[in-house]
């Protein structure tokens, strides 16, 4: 009988694997957890690349929430062997790089949004934005933004909310935001940094690497996005641990 790899917690913050490499073993996948509505993986063969630029980044969740950019000069770049032999999607703040997706329906809160990203030494924008969303059903008052500003990681719901201090530039991190109104939780590499009020707006669209047009804060990302994972629910402590164990093993943070 095949033996599945199991993940066990020891105490409150450690984990170890039992099972090793055995017949029938299937490695952890973000889609092993229910309600995964988006999974973008920069290293997988899920990008359409034309002369080094990415016109489409395809969703691995099975929901066909693909991200595209039709304007050639606004397409981000494909970078090979960025870290641990893995590819990256690179955004330049000297250009208007962005990828967009309109979801087929509104994903109401709670939602968990996980992004592996960094800010590089060329980051000069006042508020470089990792992702931005204007709710196409309820308007710009229900935005959903993860960004850096004034040496802080911040998010935006009904108002700008400072989550925690972080100086730029910085290497790859995993930012996990569990959007659940006044109990919105912000994590870095699986460690809770703050609980804030980020509003109750759901997800209806998303832009990667740039801000929506004519909205403040506005800023272009100068750095890389490696993975983007979204669940249409609040992940449990164990589920979040499993995702971040997978990410930390892959990227080494």
Image (cartoon, rainbow, N blue to C red):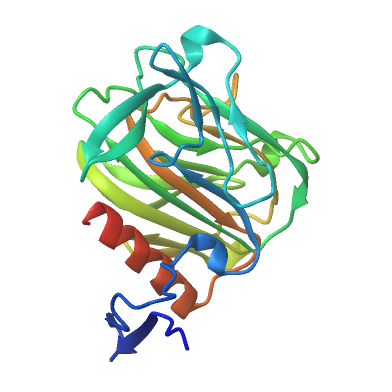
Q: Residue at x 24, y 35 (%)?
A: 82
Q: Residue at x 29, y 50 (%)?
A: 173
Left or right of 180: which side holds 155? left
Between 231 and 17, the one lying in front of the other is: 17
Dividing the picture into quadrants, the one containing residue 179 is bottom right
Q: Residue at x 64, y 66 (%)?
A: 233
Q: Residue at x 48, y 8 (%)?
A: 73
- From the top left corner, tell me how far across and down residue 51 is, in percent: 41, 11
- From the top left corner, tell me how far across and down residue 187 is, in percent: 38, 62
Dividing the picture into quadrants, the one containing residue 32 is bottom right
Between 87 and 222, the one lying in front of the other is: 87
- From the top left corner, tell me how far across and down residue 171 is, in percent: 21, 43
The quadrant of the rendering that contains the C terminus is bottom left
In the image, residue 133 above or below residue 90: below
Q: Looking at the image, which residue sits at the far bottom?
A: 11
* Tag count: 0
Dividing the picture into quadrants, the one containing residue 219 is top left
Answer whether residue 222 is visible to the viewer in this image. no
Left or right of 173: which side holds 206? right
Answer whether residue 105 is visible to the viewer in this image. yes
- From the top left corner, tell me how far across and down residue 21 is, in percent: 30, 75
């Amino acid at each position: 009988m095949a033996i599945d790899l199991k993940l066990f917690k020891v105490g409150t913050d450690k984990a170890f694997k039992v099972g090793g490499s055995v017949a029938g073993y299937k490695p952890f996948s973000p889609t092993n957890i229910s309600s995964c509505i988006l999974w973008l993986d920069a290293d997988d063969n899920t990008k359409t690349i034309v002369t080094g630029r990415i016109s489409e980044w395809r969703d691995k969740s099975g929901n066909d929430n693909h991200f595209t950019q039709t304007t050639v000069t606004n397409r981000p770049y494909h970078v090979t062997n960025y870290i641990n032999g893995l590819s990256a999607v690179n955004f330049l703040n000297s250009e208007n790089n962005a990828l967009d997706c309109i979801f087929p329906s509104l994903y109401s809160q709670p939602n968990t949004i996980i992004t592996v990203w960094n800010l590089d030494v060329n980051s000069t924008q006042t508020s470089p934005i990792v992702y931005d969303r204007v709710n196409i059903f309820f308007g710009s008052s229900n935005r959903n933004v993860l960004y850096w500003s004034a040496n802080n990681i911040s998010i935006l719901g009904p108002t700008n909310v400072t989550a925690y201090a972080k100086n730029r530039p910085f290497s790859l991190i995993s930012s996990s935001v569990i959007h659940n109104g006044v109990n919105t939780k912000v994590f870095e590499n699986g460690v809770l940094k703050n609980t804030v009020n980020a509003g109750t707006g759901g997800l209806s669209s998303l832009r990667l690497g740039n801000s929506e047009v004519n909205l403040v804060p506005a800023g272009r990302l100068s750095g890389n996005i490696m993975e983007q994972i979204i669940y249409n629910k609040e992940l449990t402590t164990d589920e979040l641990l499993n995702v971040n164990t997978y990410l930390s093993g892959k990227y080494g943070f």
